Amino acid sequence: MNASDPDQVFLQEAQDLLEQLEHSLLDLESTPGDGDLIDTAFRALHTIKGSGAMFGFDAVAAFTHHVENAFDLVRKGKVTPTGELIAVALAAKDHMRMLIDQPANASASAGDTILEDLQRFMTAAIGSASEERPGGEPVATEQTVWRIRFRLPADAMATGTNPLLLLDELRTLGEASVTALTGGVPSLEAIDPGLGYLSWDVTLRTDQSRAAIEEVFLFVIDEMELDIEQIATDGDDAIPPPIAQSDDDAPLKFAPVPAARQNPGGETRETKSVDTIRVPAERLDELMDRVGQLVIAQSRLKEIAAASNDAAMKSVTEDIERLSLELRDTTMGVRMLPIGQLFGRFRRLIHDLARDHGKNIELVAVGEETELDKTVIERLNDPLIHLIRNSVDHGIEDPATRAASGKVPLGRITLAARHIGSGVLISILDDGRGLDRARIRARAEENGLFAPGARLTDGELFQAIFQPGFSTAREVTSLSGRGVGMDVVKRAIDGLRGTIDVASTAGQGSEITLRLPLTLAIIDGLLVRVGRGRYVIPLSAVEECVELSMEEDARSRGRNFLNVRGDLVPFLRLRELFNATTPPDRYQKVVIVSAGDLRVGLVVDQVIGDHQTVIKSLSKLHANIKIFSGATILGDGAVALILDIAHLVEHGQRHEERLKAAS
């Protein structure tokens, strides 16, 4: 382990705790009396402070200490977490993140301003909470004297637990007398410098409860020995002397953490533990790359076995194919993350945007347990930010406008996710004013995107908003109006091999649906041949395969429609698209594929079969070739291009429109 490892441990833990703190604060704004949320936020602050001091992040620990003190008033019920207080607490959380991630750029004055605001809340809370007797004499708070004896595990210091920090924490609760018990210290020659031998005796006078004392030891209580005893109440004038030290240092009582905790409502909450281990994302990427190489090698072995008459080789090849498939699925499963952690990031975004623009908006998340490849989730962040900001600015109305329209003042943005086949649908819905078709059409015609008076479906019209420079905003705001954003969304989703559908109802809201693959690493594909070339069609887009005889081929010349059980399906001749020079096969095949609600047939010479496709990106020189989304290496070492179904369907739709216009 190198010297930077402890810092990395703290940084990762701090990121998780800051996210937990943010979620708790946002929830508190709608349910200010929720004790569990208050406790969760306080524990997050407490842990960040203690861990920061332990790992040398003194600025973080000092700042968080003041925030924790202010939030302790909330925990004690002396102040209600109002929207103003939540806003200051969120600003404090942002400053803590800056102190952790970019300490050199953290503004000391900004931190001081936040602490001044918090101090104002503390002063107001203490002033309103201090009651006076009729004669003007302040009401005394009852105090209790506790005797606390504890011994940490011998390796506590080596694992990062400093008893002096725990003692300092106890001193913040009240007047304390601390004695170190040295009876367990061995002779000098027997001492191991890496181990701790002291135990501690603390006599504490405080107005805090036993639970507050136990909370000091919250993160080490499972492994330590702890004895807490109430020895006096406020009737005593002086703190009793500490227990006399004994040479044998008698064993202390063990205080286990209860398997179930009782909350104020009397409801029992079971504590569940799940074994987890942190693995750097780079290692997962390397593992996925190795699995991809294994899949390619397995394809080569499969071809060799197919040309051999050795039964033993065929049997082993089948076993390796099965194991490589299971390893692929397992590795992809490790890379899968619940999309809820992405949705959770946008709660703060919507909270701040609504506050800044005078709107009342709530975020509703549906299907947060839906899993998606971590790479896809990472690349979805920016597109979703653009879409949400667009919904806040163009979609959700201000409370007065909503009331005039007969709507409730509180607007709603819903993020929903669900699996569909081997892909995922992500929808962004709002209950705002909806898209203005007339303004979109006018601006599109002004920009030359459509001919004046052209007949357009809603789907075709709404796709105009994704064109570069397109905007219907009458003025430039901090959110929109420059025509930059939606075209970025389109490029990002195209880069994920996904599609975007838009639906809207005037006065009721809009829905944008993203159709995305589960992963960008390995997919199941259908290997086909066109002329001498081989191509891969993503199996998730394939509906069926039908035969196209030479007679049917001849009859369809000029109209390019195929009758599939009564439905007319337009088709593309890939031989013409790819300029194949060899004679076509006598019985060509049509692979029916779909993208959204559209279906197109792809005419190929031969359907070779299914293929585990390891996706390789194309070079920048091929970035403008939209009908291919990548390439893969076949078992014989040849390269096969992967077809981009969305662009092929779009190409087929335009081809159909040209035929209709010509007829």
Image: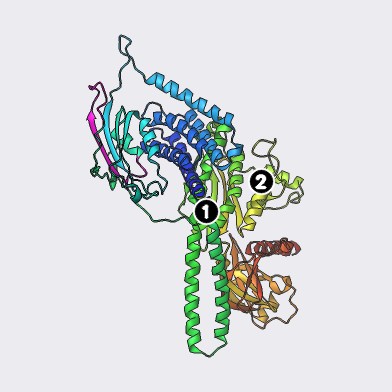
Q: Nearer the viewer, residue 567 or 206?
A: 206
- The image's colour scheme reads rainbow
Residue type (three-letter) at the residue carrying disc 1: Asn
- Camera-near label (2 vs 1) is 1
Asked whether residue 457 is in view, the answer is no
**Which residue is the site of mark 2?**
485
Q: Residue furthest bottom?
A: 309
Between residue 465 and residue 22, name the one nearer to us: 22
Q: Secondary structure at mark 1?
A: loop
**SS for tag 2?**
loop
Gap in Å between the C-alphas at discs 2 and 1? 43 Å
In the picture, measured across the screen, residue 89 lies left or right of residue 499, that is left
Q: Label 1 near label 2: C-beta < 8 Å?
A: no
Residue 440 is left or right of residue 611, and the answer is right
Q: Position of residue 642 (x, y in %)?
A: 64, 68
For this orientation, the residue located farthest to the front is 189
Nearest the eye: 47 or 464: 47
Give the amino acid at mark 2: Gly
Magenta residues, start to end: 217-241
Label 1 neighbour load within 10 Å: few <14, some 14-19, many 20+: few
- Please tell me whether residue 517 is drawn above or below residue 178 in the rendered image: below
Q: Which residue is mark 1?
A: 2
Task: Specify the label residue 223 is tagged with.
Answer: none
Main SS of the magenta part reads loop
Question: At 30% from the left edge and 22% from the top edge, which residue is drawn?
Answer: 141
Residue 472 in sight here: yes
- Look at 43% across and 35% down and name the residue there: 28
The answer to which quarter of the image holds residue 240 is top left
